[in-house]
Image: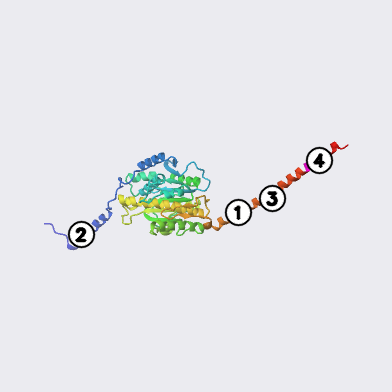
Amino acid sequence: MAASPPRPLLRLLLTLALALTVAAAGKISAPRTPISRDIYHSSDSLLREIKALVAQHSDKLSMDTITTSNKGYSADLFVVTFNHVKESVDNGSKVHILLSFGQHGRELVTSEVALRLLYILTEKRKIAGVDLSSFERVLENLVIKVVPMENLNGRKHVEEGELCDRRNGRGVDLNRNWSVDWGKKEKDYDPYEENPGIAPFSEPEAQIMRELSRSFKPHIWVNVHSGMEALFMPYDHKNTTPNGASAHLMRSVLENLNHRHFQDSCLVGSGGGSVGYLAHGTTTDYMYDIAKVPMPFTFEIYGDEKASTDDCFKMFNPVDKTTFDRVINKWCMAFLILFEEGLRNLRDAQIVSRVTPDNWVPIGGDVVERNVAQKTARERRKLEGLDLGMQELRTYFRLFMVSTFLLMFMFCTRISKNRNRDSGNVFDP
């Protein structure tokens, strides 16, 4: 019979085996939740449905497909434009709104919000029983461009099984590829998650979005993400918000939205000061600093804090139909209230001209009447000036009529005298 090993050695071997077992168990990742394909559209089916909606409502919707390539990598971007009365001329009074969804491939729920929002804008579907007919007057004053899936190539990777991938088709984070503070890396920088690319705007998707912002000149920009629930304004790359009237305007809109719709439950503030980390080269910071958009925002619309960090689909997207519908409806309504708040605040700040009707009905609110007694002091002064001007015109008109009458009388009198004189000369002996 073979001799058994000494007890101390046996205990050591058992301890080592236990440690290896624990280590191996730690490497076994928790099961990952697959895409709920009975709830979510594929990228192809979502785009097909949007194209069909555009064709059905060609009086209000149009769609552009933009393709750009860079060093062998190509990207397509689909841009849907909503204009309540397409044939009307935009005289500068309409508010331009640019919305981007799906910048990170793994955040599928954001593109679903884009699709539902387009349905609401065109078919006036009710949201949780709320009648949206009163919203018509707001829509008449907006031009809205929707990018339903900014990162189509990255979305394809997710659908193929890379559920945690947020990058584009060649591994670049599109929300780090913009020029404001580009390329700076924090101590916790993750090259897989936050690859900024080889240079600012190296990626076709970012190039297209930059050109879109230049040509459209939005007054409101929203970059829609998931991972938490929050309403963010600049900045992302530093722990502060901008100074002055513009910052006050942005914060006022977000706080009103948070109070009216979310019962003050959303996180509001700068991205860099609220998320817990700084992000460099983001789209929203560019929109504010370079594109000079008056109201650039980032909305985070959903996050499951209890999900494992490896279970990305569950972390960034609702996995059951009840939660899915609740999130979609809640954030579609949030966008409608944002449109309303943004329109009112931009016009109060005289960033766009005011040509809205005197009476309009806010969503979920009472009739707002704007008569002469309630107008601003500036508007009252304009009315008083017009009254004085009309009085002066009436006075000048009276003087003109009197002068004309006197001239005609003098002219007729002179002609009469001349005739009498000529008549006397003829019959004198």
- Residue 266: x percent and y percent? 39, 58
Q: Amino acid at mark 2?
A: Leu
Which one is earlier in the sequence, the residue at label 2 or at label 1? 2
Task: Tell me the crowding category of disc 4: few under 14, some 14 to 19, or many 20 or more residues within 10 angstroms, Cα based.
Answer: few
Judging by the rendered image, the residue that carries numbered circle 2 is: 14
Nearer to us in this view, 37 or 62: 62
Judge whether residue 123 can be spotted in this image.
yes
Of badges 4 and 1, nearer the viewer stands 4
Of badges 3 and 1, nearer the viewer stands 3
Which one is earlier in the sequence, the residue at label 2 or at label 3? 2
Which one is earlier in the sequence, the residue at label 3 or at label 1? 1
Task: Tell me the crowding category of disc 3: few under 14, some 14 to 19, or many 20 or more residues within 10 angstroms, Cα based.
Answer: few
- Residue 354: x percent and y percent? 52, 51
Judging by the rendered image, the residue that carries numbered circle 4 is: 420
Judging by the rendered image, the residue that carries numbered circle 1 is: 387
Does residue 388 appear to the left or right of 411 in the view shown?
A: left
Which one is earlier in the sequence, the residue at label 4 or at label 1? 1
